[in-house]
Amino acid sequence: MVRQAVYQRLGKPIPKTAAAPNPLVVNISARHCHLTQAAVETLFGKGRQLTPLKWLYQEGQFAAKETLTLIGPRSRVISNLRILGPCRTLNQVELAYTDAIALGFEIPLRMSGNIEGTPGGMLMGPAGFFEMPSGIIRAQRHVHMHPEDAAFYGVKPGAAMKLKIGGPCAITLEAMVARVDPAFKLEVHIDTDEGNACNLRPETSCELTT
């Protein structure tokens, strides 16, 4: 803590020889959606609440048992699109580029929550349809960080970082956006296209750098 305070006072990043405060976790974020409570009730019935199926790495976040169908502009569909909970204040679908091409969408690369000017689509659930006027994106690769992690790496919220991925398909992913919050645990999110490109496996070595 003293070492961290000294380097912060000097305005310099902590040397990477220092022990990292938390282990780095890299996960592939498959296509999914976030919904408001109103959208959930339209799709699944009045009063319906999302039911946790699997708790995710970030505290309080879960993959729900409920899934839905996304209908694309070419009348092609993705079935069993997983909903992540808890409910949010906006509706958002996150796809990989290959998903979007198959459906006929032209989606922008955006940070989660930045959906202005993005394409919309039709969602179908067991109780009805819900039309999204906007909210379909490819999520910008990012890293969730606790302030202790941000201090260790010497970055501020919104900073661009790099993820060096080893193995036979080794690559370096740049423009990894740092998202900093006291509730976060250190975790990188990349999508399925990126994960497949580097053949990411549990044993694959990964290093986060600036």
Image (cartoon, helix red, strand yellow):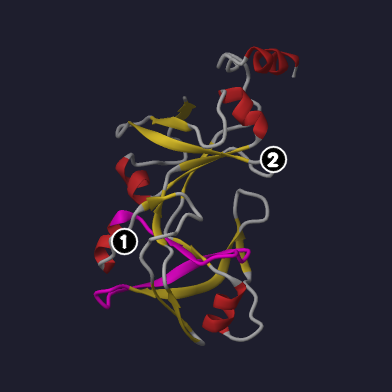
Q: CA distance from mark 2 to mark 1?
A: 33 Å
The percent position of residue 126, horizontal first and vertical second, equals 49, 85
The percent position of residue 111, horizontal first and vertical second, equals 46, 49
Kindly identify which numbered label has been placed on residue 123: none
The amino acid type of the residue labelled 2 equals Pro
Element marked by disc 1: helix
Q: Nearer the viewer, residue 76 or 90?
A: 90
44 over 1 or under it: above or below: below
Q: Say if the magenta span includes residue 81.
A: yes
Identify the residue position indicated by label 1 in the image: 99
Q: Residue at x 60, y 16 (%)?
A: 14
- Residue placed furthest toward the right: 2
Q: Residue at x 34, y 54 (%)?
A: 108
Q: Say if the magenta span includes residue 193.
A: no
The amino acid type of the residue labelled 1 equals Asp
Circle 1 Cα neighbour tier, 10 Å, few/some/many (<14 / 14–19 / ≥20): some
Q: Nearer the viewer, residue 209 or 202?
A: 209
84 over 110 or under it: above or below: below
Identify the residue position indicated by label 2 in the image: 182
Element marked by disc 2: loop
- Residue range of the region highlighted in magenta in the rendering: 72-97
Q: Nearer the viewer, residue 192 or 136?
A: 136
